[in-house]
Amino acid sequence: MKKFNIGYSTKKIPLPSRNDYLQRLIEKTEQFLRKLRWKAYFFFLNPDTAPSSKKTYGFKSTKNPPPVEELDFEDGMLKMVNYVKLKQVNNSFLNKLTDDTELIRNEPKLLIAAGKTTNITNRTRKQNLKLARHLRASSKLSKCSSFAAPAPQHKLRTLPRRRTSHY
């Protein structure tokens, strides 16, 4: 077992890759435009038509909203996403975070958190199975009656409770 320490909280989130970022940006833009089309359809074009009261049990509709001519900026918005330029970030902490992420991804051994601290141990699968067997065996021993606390042999005498008034 070798200790693997990264030196900071494991809750830190590294920057996404360029492709991941653009994928999420396109996805959220399309989601926004779809919601906008539904709002425009029901509230501006057909105000007297209420949305169907069909039970969907919390699931969103897979139905696509009808096209709305008044929303002529949709194509322009999607083109804006196409022309997004990403800036290279040079932050020593973020660079260390991405390097550590790659190191963790390429680690052939198992990385196991040791308690609630930031301590991490790396072990082989064989070492981990051996430790698991040892822990199971020790937990069986603690459940055994010979290791349990002895039952009291006599009853304890207790004094009657006094009634006190609370202000």
Image (cartoon, rainbow, N blue to C red):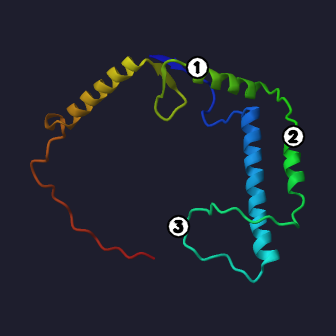
Q: Earlier in the sequence, mark 2 or mark 3?
A: 3
Q: Give the total number of marks visible in the rendering.
A: 3
Hey, what amino acid is under mark 3? Tyr
Q: Quadrant of residue 39?
A: bottom right
Local packing at callout 3 (Cα closer than 10 Å; few below 14, some 14-19, many 20+) is few
Q: Quadrant of residue 161?
A: bottom left
Give the distance between the C-alpha atoms of the residues marked 2 and 1, in whole angstroms: 31 Å
Local packing at callout 2 (Cα closer than 10 Å; few below 14, some 14-19, many 20+) is few
As displayed, is residue 84 above or below residue 131?
A: below
Which residue is the site of mark 2? 84
User: Which of these two is toward me, 37 or 97?
Assistant: 37
* Mark 3 or mark 1, whichever is nearer to me: 3
User: Residue at position x 70%, y 61% from top?
Assistant: 64
Find residue 125 and report its horizontal and vertical position in percent: 40, 20
Hey, what amino acid is under mark 2? Val
Find residue 127 and report its horizontal and vertical position in percent: 38, 18
User: Residue at position x 84%, y 45% from top?
Assistant: 81
Hey, what amino acid is under mark 1? Asn
Secondary structure beneath label 3: loop
Marks 2 and 1 in Cβ contact (< 8 Å): no
Please tell me the numbered disc located at residue 106. Answer: 1
As displayed, is residue 62 above or below residue 29?
A: below
Q: Earlier in the sequence, mark 2 or mark 1?
A: 2
Please tell me the numbered disc located at residue 57. Answer: 3
Find residue 91 and report its horizontal and vertical position in percent: 80, 27
As displayed, is residue 34 above or below residue 133?
A: below
Secondary structure beneath label 1: loop
Q: Earlier in the sequence, mark 3 or mark 1?
A: 3
Secondary structure beneath label 2: loop
